[in-house]
Image (cartoon, grey):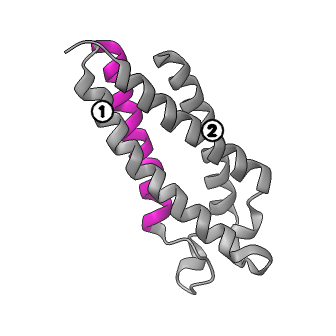
Amino acid sequence: MGLVTVVTWLFTAIVGIYLLYLWLSGGGLRQQATKVTRFPVALIFSHPALAICALACWVAFLLTGNRVLAWAAFGVLAGAALLGFTLFTRWLGAGRHARGAERRLPVLAVLLHGVAGVATFVLVLLTAAVARGQ
């Protein structure tokens, strides 16, 4: 189940990179000064940073079998998930009145990223819960 988790994690990351690219190419960073965007820079970059740290813990768990690393990955991923939920609610709250770079984010990509993220979160939890080892 650990490798299936990595596959879902990588799919989630690929869609997330696409969304980040769309936001950046739509002028998301430039719009920070004028407050046109609803996404603060700290939020935009801390969400993937935490997810990458959690993935590193997960890979270390897969290589060593150390349960502490699995739970560390889960804890850090929980933080990334909370930030992702914050981004989603800000994006959703804009709705038809979205301004700036968030207008460029396709609904399908946002939904794929969210559903794959939730699946990854659940898989990490289940795998950490049944993991045997140190």
State which quarter of the image contains the C terminus.
top left
Whether residue 13 is visible: no
Q: Residue placed at 60% from the left, 78% from the top?
A: 31
Q: Earlier in the sequence, mark 2 or mark 1?
A: 1
Q: Which of these two is toward me, 32 or 76?
A: 76
Which amino acid, mark 1?
Trp
Q: Is residue 37 above or below residue 91?
A: below
Determine whether, in the image, residue 4 is placed left or right of residue 63: right
Determine whether, in the image, residue 55 is placed left or right of residue 103: left
In the rendered image, residue 52 lying in the magenta stretch gets the answer yes
Q: Position of residue 47 (x, y in %)?
A: 46, 54
Does dot 1 land on a helix, a strand or a loop?
helix
Determine whether, in the image, residue 8 is placed left or right of residue 133: right
Does dot 2 land on a helix, a strand or a loop?
helix
Q: Rate crowding at label 2 as few (under 14), some (14 to 19) or many (20 or more) other CA atoms within 10 Å.
A: some
Residue furthest out toward the bottom: 34
Q: Is residue 38 above or below residue 5?
A: below
Q: Position of residue 133 (x, y in %)?
A: 24, 12
- The residue carrying mark 1 is 71
Q: Position of residue 74 (x, y in %)?
A: 36, 37
Q: Residue placed at 41% from the left, 43% from the top?
A: 77
Determine whether, in the image, residue 48 is placed left or right of residue 96: left
Q: Which of these two is toward me, 114 or 13?
A: 114
Q: Residue placed at 73% from the left, 60% from the top?
A: 105
Tell me the tag on residue 84.
Answer: none
- The residue carrying mark 2 is 116
Whether residue 23 is visible: yes
Instruction: Write the start and end of the magenta stretch as one range.
Output: 42-64
Q: Which of these two is toward me, 87 or 71?
A: 71
Which amino acid, mark 2?
Ala
